[in-house]
Amino acid sequence: MREDRRFIFLIGQARHRLMTRLDQALIETAGITAAQSGALYYLKEHDGCLFTELSSALGLDKSAITGLVDRLESKGLVERRPSPDDRRAIGIFLTAAGKDTALKCLKVTREFNNRITRGLSEEEMETFSRALRNVISTFSE
C-alpha cells in the first residue's frame, strides 16, 4: 500500500489533534492554553519584554497579543509595568505564579514531545525535524 502523501492534510490533522490534546492537558494542569503557555515560556527567558517583541516571537498580531496578555494578567500570571529602559513603553513581567505555571506547563509540553518521538530513531527524529523546519522556512514571509 502506498504511503499517504497529502502533506497539507496530514500536517493539518496532526496539528489539530496535537494542539487539541495539548490544550486539554495544559488546561487541566495549569488552567491555561498552549498559546498562553508559549507566552510564559518566552517571558521566562525575556522577562519584561515589550508587546511588540512578544508578538513577533509568538507570531501573533497586536490585537491577539493584547488579548492573550489580558487573559494572563487576569489570572495573575503576568503584570504590565513601565519598561526600565523607556518609561513610555510597557513591559510584560512574569509574576511568581506565572513562573510556577510555566514550569508546570513545561513538564506537560515535554511529555507531549516525548510522545511525538516515541519509537523514532535518532535519524528519524532528525529527518522529521528537518522536514518540519523546511516547511516553516518555505512558507515564512
Image (cartoon, rainbow, N blue to C red):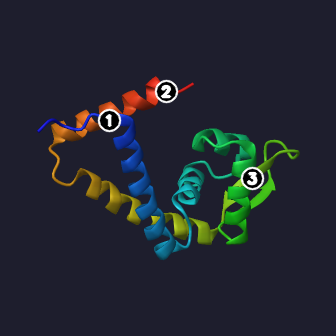
- The residue at which mark 1 appears reads as 6
Q: Amino acid at mark 2?
A: Phe
Q: Amino acid at mark 1?
A: Arg
Q: CA distance from mark 1 to mark 3?
A: 36 Å
Residue at 24% over, 51% down: 117
Quarter placement of the N terminus: top left
Crowd class of label 3 (few under 14; some 14 to 19; many from 20; radius 10 Å):
some
Callout 3 touching callout 2 (CB < 8 Å) = no
Q: CA distance from mark 3 to mark 2?
A: 25 Å
Q: x, y (%) of residue 94?
A: 64, 61
Which mark is drawn over residue 66?
Answer: 3
Q: x, y (%) of residue 5?
A: 27, 34
Q: Amino acid at mark 3?
A: Thr
Which of the two discs, 2 and 1, labels the residue nearer the N terminus?
Answer: 1
Crowd class of label 2 (few under 14; some 14 to 19; many from 20; radius 10 Å):
few
Q: Is residue 54 above or below residue 110?
A: above
- The residue at which mark 2 appears reads as 139
Q: x, y (%) of residue 84?
A: 79, 48
Which of the two discs, 1 and 3, labels the residue nearer the N terminus?
Answer: 1
Q: CA distance from mark 2 to mark 1?
A: 17 Å
Q: Nearer the viewer, residue 15 or 54?
A: 15
Name the mark nearer the viewer: 2 or 1. Answer: 1
Q: Is residue 23 above or below residue 139?
A: below
Residue at 51% over, 71% down: 27
Report helix, strand or loop for mark 3: helix
